[in-house]
Amino acid sequence: MKISFLLTTGDTNAGTEHAVKAQIQGLLQRGHQASIISLYRTDGSLQSAVPSEVAVTYWIDSDGTDLSGTVPAELTSTIFSEPSSLVPYAWDDQFNKLADIVAQQQLPRIDADVLVTTTPALAMLASHFAPDATVIVAQEHRASMRRGVGITPLANVAHNIDAIVSLNNENEDWILEEFAGKGFVSAVIPNSLEDVFRPRASVDNRTIMASGRLAPGKQFDHLLKAFALFRENHPDWDLKLYGSGARETALRTLMGELNLNDSVTIITGLNDLRTEWSKAGIHAMTSRSEGQPLVILEALAAGVPTVAYDCPIGPRNILSHGQDGYLVPLNDTEQFAQTLGQLAEDHELRAAMGRKALETAVAYAPDTINDKWVELYEQLLERRHVGESRISTNLRHASATDQSGSAKGANVDSVHGQASASGDKFQITIVEPEELSVSRVMDDNREAVRSLLAEAKVPFVQIPAYGTYRQSFAVREGDKDALLATIATNAPASLCLRPMRGNRQFTAKDWHPRFAPLDPYAEDSLDTLRAFIPISDSLRRFTWGSAMGVDIEFWTETDEGYTPGRHNPGVDLLTEEDFTNGQILTDVPLWDHIQYPIDVVYTWVDDQDPQWQQQKHEFTADTSGQHELSVGQMRFRNRDELKYSVRSVRSFMPWVRNIYLVTADQYPKWLAEESEIKVITHREIFPEPEVLPVFNSHAIESCLHRIPGLAEHFLYFNDDTMLLRLQDPANYFHGNGLAKFFMSPVKIAIHSKDAEPHMWAAQNNRKMLFQRFGRVITRGMLHTPQPHRKSVLEQIEADYPEVFQKVRAARFRSPSDISLLSSFAQYYGYFTGTYMPGNLKYTYCSLSTPSLPQRLHDLQVTQSFDVLTIGEGENPQWSGEQVDEMIDQFFRSRFPYPAKDEIHSKNVPVPNGEGV
C-alpha cells in the first residue's frame, strides 16, 4: 500500500506530528510506502526527522512562497494575505486564499491508496479535491466535541470520508451520534509510543516537567499559578516547561509577577525530550482539552507519574487515578497545587506510581497499534467496489447499517443490513446532476410500476393522487399475491417499496425486493405500496425518493364494486369496467388542482457597480432629513445571493413558467446570455421615467405588475430568500386562483414616534386600509416568496393613483410610502376576497447572531423548512470578511450545482424530496 499523510505544518514538533512519525515507522517496517504532505513549511526539519525513504512535500513556505509551483510568484504574496474562501477563519485560522488554490490544484495529483488527514479542515479539502479512488481516513487527534465550530468542516463531508478514527471510545461515541447515517467507518486507535530507548527517571528527582505548545488551550498559566502555591511549602523543587508558541511572552511576564524566575525555566527548540523525562520527578498537565496526550505516554514510559486536569477526554483515558497519576478537577489550581505537594512529599508513593507508569506504557507499544492501522487500511480498500466513489461506498453501507449509521470498529464488514445471497446490498442510484429532472424521476417510477403490473398480468386503474408529484394506481385486492410474487422475483435492483396501511408506514425499513423478502406481517397488513427508485447526485445534496413515488393501492371487492383502504381525492368506488379502461379522472384537472401559469419576479441591485454607486452618492451627498436605515449600505449589500436563490427556484419549483429579474440597468456577471431569465429595467416599468434613478424598494415594487407579459399569478422574491425543499404550487395559491399570504407574529408599531423606515409604510398601510374597509391590520408579513395577483395590483393602483405616483417618486424610503407587495396587497386582497391566509415552514437567519457558524451548519443539512431568509446585521464578533466567508461556504455547500441560467453551466439538478 501507498499511504500519504496530510499535515498543516509538518515541521511543528507537537503530538500529532509525533503520532504520524510513529505510524510511518510501523508502515515501513511492514513493507508499505509512506509519504508526507505539509501544507506549510517553517524550517524544513520534518525531512530530517523521518527516514530517508519517506518523501516529504511542502506546498507553501512560511513567507508565502508557493513551493508547489501552482501560482505565479508575482501573485502569491497578495493572495497569501487574503482570507480563505474554503475554510472560514472561525473553523481554522491557518488557511488563506493561496492555500485554497494550491490545495485545489495539488490534491487531485496525489498518488496514494490511502490519504490520511489530521484536522477537520484538511479532511474537508481532501474530500473535495483528492482522487475519488483514494481512500480518505480522517484522524481526530483532538477531542471532537471540544472543537466547537472547528468540527464543522468534517461534519459537512462525513459522507465523503471512508473512515473517521478517534483516539478513545468517548470521542467515537460522540462522532457516531453527531454524524449518524453517513456510512463511514468509525474506529478507535490510540497513538503509540515511538519504539526507542528511553532512560528511566529517578525517584529522587525534584523537577516538575511540562511539555507542549505554548498556546491558550494548554493553560500553562494555570500551571504557573499552581506551582507558585506549591513552591511555598516545597522550595527545593523547580519547574521546567518545554515548548514554544504565541503565549511565551505572556507566560514569562506571569513568571515575573509570581516571582518564579529563579525556579521556573522555559526551554524552547528542544525536540527530543527522552533524556529530559529521565530528569523529572512529576509530570504536570493543565490542558482544558486533549485528544490523546502523547506527553503523558512519554512520561509514563520514563516512569514519571502525571498530575493532570481531568478534562472531558484525554488524560482520563490513559491514567488510572491514584495508581500511575492523579486527575484533578478541571481548572482547580489550588487542588492541583495540593496534589503536586502530596506526590512530592511521599517518596514511596512516587516510586510505586513510577513502576505502575511503566506498566501502563506497555499497552501503547508500536507493534500493537501499527497492526491496527494496517488492518484498517486494508479493510477500507476491500470495502470499495471497483470504480466506486467514496460517497457511493458510504451510501451503500449506510443503507445497511444499524441506528448508528456507520460501521463501528475496524471490522468494516460487521454492519447490519439486507443482503442477497451474493452479499450485495441495496444502494441508491447515483447520477450526474444534469441527468436529473422532475419528469424523469416521475416517469421512471411510473414505468417501473407499469412494467411489474404488466408482467404480473394485473389490471389497474390510474386514479387521482394527493400532491403535485405523487401518482396512484388502484389494484384489486384479489391480485395482491400475484403482484407481490412478481415484485419479489422481477423487481429492478434499484426499486424500493414502502409498505403502508392507509397513509401510514408501519415497518421500520423499506422493502428492497431484490435483496430481502417482505416481512410476513407487512404482507398481511399492507393495503398500499409506495414504489420509488431512490436517485441522488454524487454529493447527495439532492435526493429524490418517496416524494415522487407511485402508490399501488389494493382495493377491496364489495357488492357495489371496489372500495379503497384510504381516502382518495377523486373517487371512492371503482367498477370492473374501470379496471378495463385503466384510468379514471386523470385526464381532467380536479377542482383544487392548479393549471394556470405562475411566474417569479426578483428585484436586484449590484451594489459594487461603480455607475450605480456614483448615482447613489449623488443623491445621498446631502442626507439631511434622510433616515440612516433608508440610505445605509446594509440595505443594498450584494453577496451573490441572487445566484443561489435562482438555483433554489430551479431546483425546487420546476413548475415555474418565467423568471423575471428587475434591475437598474444592471446585469449579473454570472448570468448567461442564453438564459431564459428575462431581465427587465426600471425604465420599462416606471410610467414616469423622469423619477429615475430610484433606490427605494417600495417604489420599485409598486411597478412590478407592469412587467410586460407577466402572468396573472406570480411570486415576488427578494434575492435573500432561498427555498430549502421541493415546493408545491398549492403552497402559494388555491385552485380557484386565490393567492395566499403568510403573516408574521411581529406587530405593526402603534405607539412608536421614531419608527424605522420599514414601519413607515406599514403604518400607512394600516391607515389607508382602515379608511377603506373599517378594519385595523396589526401584523406584517413573513419574508417569504410573496404570492400575488396582477389584476389585484392593477385595481389597487386604479383606486390610489396619487399614492402610487408619490411612492414611485421617492428615491429612498419615505414617510409617505406604502409597502404594496409585502403587506398592502395581501390585506386588500383579503378584504376583497382574492387573497387568503396560508402557511409555510419558514426560518430566518440573521448574519449578526453570535452562533452564526453553528446556525449555518444546521441549515446546510435540514429538510424541515420550505423557505430561508438571510438577514443582514452588524455584530462586532464577526468581521465583514468572516461573514462573507461563512455565507459563501454555506451557499456553495447548500446549493452546489449551477443552474442552467449561469455562464458555462449545465442544467440544474433535481430537488431534494422526502428522502429515502
Image (tube, helix red, strand yellow):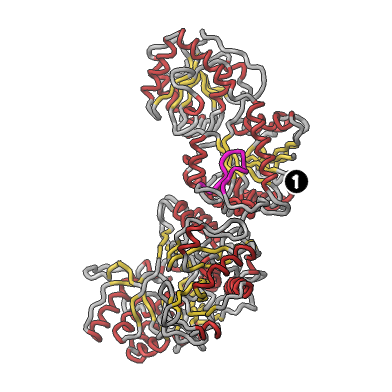
In this rendering, is residue 54 above or below 818? Answer: above
Residue 6 sits in quarter: top right
Q: Secondary structure at mark 1?
A: loop
Q: Residue at x 50, y 53 (%)?
A: 882
Left or right of 772, for residue 725:
right
Name the main secondary structure of what is drawn in magenta: loop
Say left or right for 349 vs 113: left
Determine which quarter of the picture holds residue 222: top left
Q: Depth check: give the residue in front, 325 or 175.
A: 175
Q: Residue at x 56, y 16 (%)?
A: 358
Outermost bottom residue: 798
Residue range highlighted in magenta: 404-416
The percent position of residue 875, horizontal first and vertical second, equals 41, 54
Q: Dot 1 corresponds to which residue?
A: 111
Residue projecting furthest to the front: 559
Vertical placement of residue 846 versus 191, above or below: below
Amino acid type indicated by mark 1: Asp
